[in-house]
Every structure is written in C-alpha cells, then in structure tokens.
Image: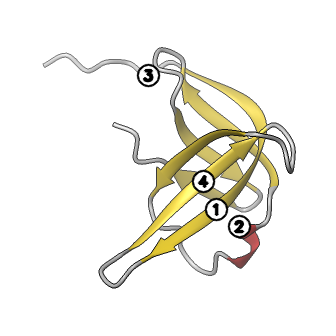
Amino acid sequence: MYVKRLELTDFRSYAHVEVEKDSESTDYYVCLRTAPGAPLLHRVAVYAPRGRIDTLRTPQAARVFIDRHSGKPLVVDLPGRRLWTMVA
C-alpha cells in the first residue's frame, strides 16, 4: 500500500469560527482572512471544537498549515486551540 506523504507549508492569517445549526446537526467552519475585515480567503468545514467556542467567534491571529500540492488548509492553530479541517 502506498501512502502519500504530505508536504505542508504554513502562513499567518486571521481566523474565526462560524456555526450553522439546524434541527438535526451543528456544523462548524473556520473563516480565514489576511486581516480582520479583509475579503474571505477560505471557509472550510472543521471538526467540532472542544469546550467553549465563544473566543473563536472573534477574528484572531492564526497559523494555518496547508497541503502544498492541493493548496487546501488542513490545520488552523489558534492561541490555545487547534482546529482540524474536514478536507479530503
């Protein structure tokens, strides 16, 4: 079995979490921008963060790790938190 080796690169960004709720589920998305109020670069589904997410709803500095081949964000590192994307 061949396992593709990930090649990651990182960049600085501003991130916040958006929550979408309906009667059957709750979905979480991380929104990435170059600065607070700047145009949206990526909006990516993430696994549900643990604990309270109130502080994650405000844009804050983040380190984003992307797959060098696809350009898709894989991990978003925020102060004290790490969000894992659902990118296949």
Check whether the beta carbons of the residues at disc 1 and disc 4 lie within 8 A of each other: yes
Q: Which numbered disc covers residue 56?
A: 2
Q: Are marks 4 and 3 in contact (CB under 8 Å)?
A: no
Mark 4 neighbour density, 10 Å: few (under 14) some (14–19) many (20 or more)? many
- Please state the horizontal and vertical placement of residue 60, each as a whole percent of the image: 82, 56
**Which quadrant of the figure contains the C terminus?**
top left
Which one is earlier in the sequence, the residue at label 4 or at label 3?
Answer: 3
Image position, residue 39 (x, y; %): 77, 40
Dot 2 or dot 3: first in sequence order is 3
Q: Check disc 3: other Cα within 10 Å, few if <14, some if 14-19, many if 20+.
A: few
Q: Check disc 4 and give the amino acid type.
A: Val
Q: Is residue 37 left or right of residue 23?
A: right
Image disc number at residue 82: none
Give the residue at mark 3.
6
Q: CA distance from mark 4 to mark 2?
A: 9 Å
**Residue at the spot of label 1:** 17
Q: Callout 2: helix, strand or loop?
A: helix
Q: Residue at x 79, y 65 (%)?
A: 58
Give amino acid for label 3. Answer: Leu
